[in-house]
Image (spheres, grey):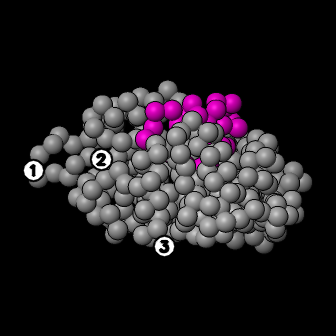
Amino acid sequence: MIDLFSDTQTRPTPGMREAMARAEVGDEQSGSDPSTNALCERVAALLGMEAGVFMPSGTLCNLASILVHTRRGDEIVVDDQSHIYNTEAAGAAALGGVSVRALPTRVGLFTADAVAAAIRTPQRTAPRSALVSIEQTTSFSGGTVWDLAEMRRIRDVAQARGLVAHIDGARLLNAVAATGIPASDYAQGFDSAWIDLSKGLGCPVGAVLCGSAAFVEAAWQWKYRLGGAMRQSGVLAAAGLYALDHHIAQLARDNAHAAELHRAVAGLPGLDLDATAGQSNILYFSVAGLGITAADFAAACLEEGVRVRALGTHHIRATTHLDVDSAGIARAAEVMRAKALAFAERR
């Protein structure tokens, strides 16, 4: 099976498993797990932030950030295809009493002007605009890499109007690999940001949320309240440290593999690819022009041992990662191209 369903499908490598087995551990909740402390310090330095907290998931990173930065009845601003809006079980609303204003986008990108227009004028009858979130790279809309200058304009507009600025950095390091811009440059001046360990970096679980020391202390309390606090978490943190040492270079290869898939299907009749497709490790396209559903296309590829993800009625997402090598990508490209052409002929 060539599994391109998501980069969450990765398995720990033998070297990562060995590092986990040898991990020096303590009690995370008392601050005495040395591996966890080392991971948090390293990611905070990577993002140019003061402190970090190890979280079981990126979803908890987003939720804890929202809960720290807002109060009940507030409103946050995100894109309409964001993870926060679509696949976090409405945690902001259910647990924080926060409403979500989803800006309409094509590939998950909005502008500083759109944010300025979305920020509400204070009044008794309206929620308070409290936070704007940027997802770098975009996830359900094609892995598009945000422009650094636009991110900073959005940050500045938000903060000037009294909002905090947050980065959902699930694939931030893929953006770094694509552009050469350091993660600390992307995160500079933002109130909170995080990176995922369990996607392109190949860890079994975890993410690290960063910000000021005061922010991290408040996030730690929400982590505890929500059942995310652990004990000997160094076993998991050791996987993150290993990934930062050994898997960073893989991200550029993953990006290159997505570009190879893009070249294989670009220009085929019936497929609609945005101009930003294949910028990072995600390829995203519509099969509506073939007269089929995304489920039809995904099923046809699966028959040939290639697993892609159907998103909605007509969109396909293929995500590259370290468990699929160059030979696997070449085979996936061949299958996807052949299936698209076959459906086009039937059309």
Q: Magenta segment: does it hold 171? A: yes
Rendered location of residue 329, percent (x, y): 82, 53
Q: Secondary structure at mark 2?
A: strand
Span shown in magenta: 170-198
Q: Nearer the viewer, residue 225 or 106?
A: 225
Query: How dense is the environment of label 1, judged by Cα within 10 Å: few (below 14), some, or many (20 and up)?
Result: few
Residue sitting at x 41%, y 55%: 218
Q: Secondary structure at mark 3?
A: loop
Classify mark 2: residues with Cα within 10 Å, few (<14), some (14-19) or many (20+): many
Tell us which disc is closer to us: 3 or 2: 3
Q: Which residue is mark 3?
A: 227
The residue beneath circle 2 is 130
Place of residue 180 in the rendered image (x, y in percent of width and height, measured from the top left): 69, 30
Which of 107/289 is in front? 107
Q: Quadrant of residue 65?
A: bottom left
Tell me whether circle 1 and circle 2 mark residues in contact (CB < 8 Å): no
The picture quadrant where one finds residue 291 is bottom right
Q: Marks 1/2: CA distance?
A: 15 Å
Which is closer to the viewer, label 3 or label 1? Answer: 3
Q: Is residue 122 above or below residue 102?
A: above
- The residue positioned 49% from the left and 26% from the top of the image is 149
* Kind of residue at badge 2: Ala
Q: Which mark is residue 124?
A: 1
